[in-house]
Amino acid sequence: MRRDDRVILIGEDIAGGTGGKGEEDAWGGVMGVTKGLYKEFGAGRVIDTPISEMSYIGTAVGAAATGLRPIAELMFCDFLGCCFDQILNQAAKFRYMFGGKVSMPLVIRMQCGAGFSAAAQHSQSLHALLTHIPGLKVVMPSSPYEAKGLLIEAIRDNDPVMFFENKLMYDDVGEVPDEDYTIPFGEAALRTDGEDVTICALGRMVNLAEQAVVQLRKRNIEATLIDLRSTSPLDVETICESVEETGRLVIVDEGSPRCGFAADVAALVASKAFGALQAPIEMVTPPHTPIPFAPVLEQEYLPNPERVIMAVDKVMAYGR
């Protein structure tokens, strides 16, 4: 925002409800992410809105079309249903429909993920839903370092970027450089390198998979762990190159399995690197059900390192 005065923030309670009698900048969004920005940049660039996702996402789309670079906070990705037309039929299609004469430098930040006991309407991971839509870029960071680099890249991008932040990761701690840096979309990162099995994951699932990789190494199973970073664009080349070397693939994803992101990656690998596979592809996902509210059931619903290890054992059972 200091670098580019076209960047604005828009959303519910991002400045603490400045229209009321309470303290200005009292909240900074539901997770306090934007706290402090109102005092520095003022009400003209940090804009509190009514509780109407349709209106303020539509406002952000229009602002992007006229040359501003809005960052809209949707709070929970579950609220996509309230403003889906603005994303599906407007933001995603403007550049195409106007022959490239209109750009859409819009970022929509939203929380995803279960494990917070926030129940079925505040715990979903809907990245696959938006990945399905041409014209959108879809991003999910796995660490503080990734979050900064990918968010700066998103803000400077001229296309609409859907930026998913797992709510269980806001307290994660990691090294983050003070200076600006960007991480390109569509370029996956190799977290570990191994010759026995390829594991692909996204967001918080990368951390769970990494725990599984440590345990597998104690059993002399070496895994390549790929942090995909973005689902659209997707680094299919890196995935297939790894599968060509290992012959086995396990995909870890928190989204629903039916028509989901894990199923998409499995289909791509089956069509492009089938000859390299030495075992059926395994997917570690939740069941195809709404997310339970009860903590015990919610933990049963979620992928975990033990299930990743079980999936690796299945593909390794076909021999090395």
Image (spheres, rainbow, N blue to C red):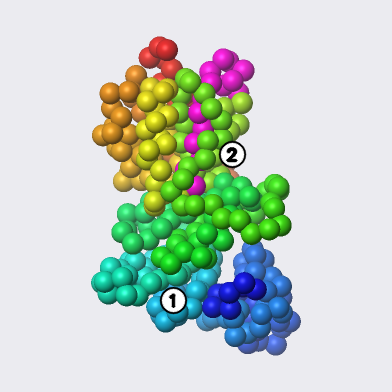
Which secondary structure, mark 2? helix
Q: Amino acid at mark 2?
A: Asn
Q: Nearer the viewer, residue 112 or 45?
A: 45
Give neighbour class at mark 2: few <14, some 14-19, many 20+ (Cα, 10 Å): some
Residue at image coords 30%, 29%? 273
Mark 1 and mark 2 in contact? Answer it, CB < 8 Å: no
Which secondary structure, mark 1? helix
Q: Which residues are magenta?
A: 215-229
Residue 181 visible within the image? yes
Tell me, yes or no, whether the highlighted magenta stretch contains residue 220.
yes
Residue at image coords 28%, 68%? 96
| Residue to which mark 1 is pinned | 64
Q: Nearer the viewer, residue 181 or 115?
A: 181
Where does residue 49 sit, x and y in percent of width and height?
A: 54, 81
The residues tagged by marks 1 and 2 sit, at their Cα atoms, a distance apart of 34 Å
Q: Quadrant of the C terminus?
A: top left
Q: Please state which of the two labelled residues, at mark 1 or mark 2, is closer to the viewer.
A: 1
| Residue to which mark 2 is pinned | 207
